[in-house]
Amino acid sequence: MRILIKASIPTEIGNAKVKDGSLGGDIQKIMAEQKPETAYFIEENGQRTAIMVVNITNSDEIPKFAEPWFLAFNAEIEFHPAMAPEDLAKAAPAIAAAAKSYG
């Protein structure tokens, strides 16, 4: 299942890692281990934030994706199930059934 992960790095920790030169290296190491389908880096609410899409087959994999961000950056992590267009197309019958029953 595709999962969108958002990892927000507190500004104080991010600034300290920029000053000691470890920010980029730590992010590169996490990216190499997690192999996201895609990744973007943005500012959100004044914090450095990574947004990634990964594939997770079981919920027991969540710590593998969360813990590096927690430990390296004391980051706030969010996990959101996500669908690609082909996933949405496959879901169309269930959506139609729900609309018929509840719409």
Image (cartoon, rainbow, N blue to C red):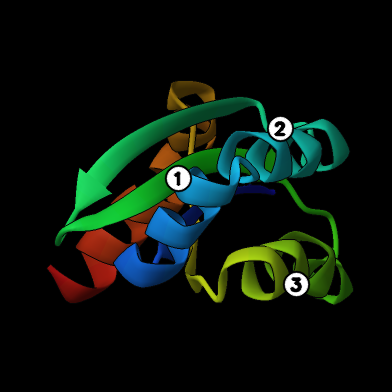
- Horizontally, residue 46 falls left or right of residue 58, namely left
Q: Nearer the viewer, mark 2 or mark 1?
A: 2
Percent coordinates x, y for residue 73 in the rendering = 58, 66
Give me the disc on residue 28.
Answer: 2
- Horizontally, residue 94 falls left or right of residue 54, namely left
- Horizontally, residue 2 falls left or right of residue 52, namely right
Q: Do the CB atoms of the residues marked 3 and 1 lie less than 8 Å apart?
A: no
Q: Is residue 82 visible?
A: no
Give me the disc on residue 67.
Answer: 3
Residue 2 or residue 91, whichever sits in front: 2
Seen at 67% across and 41% down, the residue is 54
Amino acid type assigned to the residue bearing label 3 in the image: Glu
Q: Nearer the viewer, mark 2 or mark 3?
A: 2
Amino acid type assigned to the residue bearing label 1 in the image: Ala
Give the residue at mark 1.
50
Of the image marks 2 and 3, the number of the one nearer the N terminus: 2
Residue 29 or residue 37, whichever sits in front: 29
